[in-house]
């Protein structure tokens, strides 16, 4: 392997989306790869992104299976969605752990137990620690509701409104140590309407998230099946 894991721009794979990745990516034309990739999804909240990954798999647009959903919040709605779709899930509550490291270790153990190849932080409101980042280097991705590098960290949508930007959006990126800073895989732009409140802007951004996250998974899965194929993970 010539480059560090998170250095690839995936330009050739983005081209497979016909250049639509910049503003309005199309899910109808995802990169193809095989065999099926095993996903581990990390979620803390409503799980709408999780749900759209399930839909992309069910409609055969994404050649993947969800091996495990891990949630850190026992009350999050993502659990219901896992139950409705017969997807295995595990609650690993960070409040029961004495440190971030301990929580990360439990998460890693679960991902290993289910032979997860690609880890997707889909509304995971936790900062990934070094162990998780290193173990899944180049195979750990996150979705964030802004056009990174603008508006990193919490409440990105409110940050965009406060800064009166005309365009914001969403980004899927590889996870590295600095929060919301890894190489960008795919982005979608969302214009901000005049006087728009956070709720409607959030809804419009999430509509785009539901398109770009499955696309990003396909892009990274193809890379795992081609560029990283000789690497031994387990
Ligand atoms: C998404 O909008 C995602 O971008 C955001 O949480 C939401 C989860 O929604 N993630 C972050 O803010 C991470 N910094 P969901 O639970 O309905 O998928």
Image: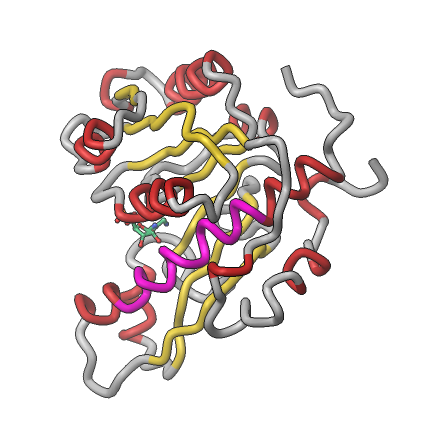
Residue 113, compared with residue 71, is above or below; it is: above
Q: How many marks?
A: 0
Could you say where residue 217 lies in the image, as x and y percent from the top left? 52, 45
Q: Give me the residue at 31% from left, 16% from top.
A: 98
Task: Name the spot of residue 204 as percent of width and height, x first.
Answer: 28, 68
Task: Find residue 157 and report its horizontal and vertical position in percent.
Answer: 30, 65
Q: Is residue 217 magenta?
A: yes
Which residue appears farthest toward the front when viewing the image?
59
Please tell me which residue is depicted at 63% across the width and 35% down the height of the picture.
34
Q: On the picture, is 155 further left or further right than 76?
A: right
Q: Main secondary structure of the magenta part?
A: helix
Residue 156 higher or lower than 234, as above or below: below
In screen coordinates, is 211 left or right of 192? right
Is residue 214 shown in magenta? Answer: yes
Its colouring scheme is secondary structure
Q: Quadrant of the N terminus?
A: top right
Question: What residue range appears in magenta?
Answer: 204-218
């Amino acid at each position: 392997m010539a480059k560090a894991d998170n250095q690839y721009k995936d330009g050739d794979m983005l081209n497979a989306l016909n250049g639509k990745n910049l503003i309005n990516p199309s899910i109808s034309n995802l990169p193809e790869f095989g065999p099926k990739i095993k996903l581990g999804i990390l979620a803390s909240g409503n799980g709408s992104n999780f749900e759209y990954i399930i839909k992309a798999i069910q409609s055969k647009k994404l050649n993947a299976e969800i091996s495990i959903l891990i949630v850190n919040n026992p009350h999050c709605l993502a659990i219901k969605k896992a139950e409705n779709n017969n997807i295995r899930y595990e609650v690993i509550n960070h409040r029961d752990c004495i440190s971030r490291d301990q929580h990360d270790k439990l998460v890693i153990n679960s991902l290993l137990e289910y032979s997860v190849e690609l880890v997707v932080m889909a509304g995971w409101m936790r900062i990934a620690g070094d162990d998780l980042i290193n173990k899944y280097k180049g195979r750990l991705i996150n979705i964030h509701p802004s056009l990174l590098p603008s508006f990193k960290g919490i409440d990105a949508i409110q940050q965009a409104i406060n800064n009166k930007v005309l365009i914001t959006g969403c980004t899927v990126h590889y996870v590295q140590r600095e929060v919301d800073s890894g190489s960008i895989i795919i982005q979608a732009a969302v214009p901000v309407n005049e006087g728009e409140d956070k709720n409607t802007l959030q809804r419009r951004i999430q509509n785009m998230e539901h398109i770009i996250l499955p696309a990003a998974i396909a892009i990274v899965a193809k890379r795992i099946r081609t560029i990283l194929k000789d690497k031994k993970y387990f």
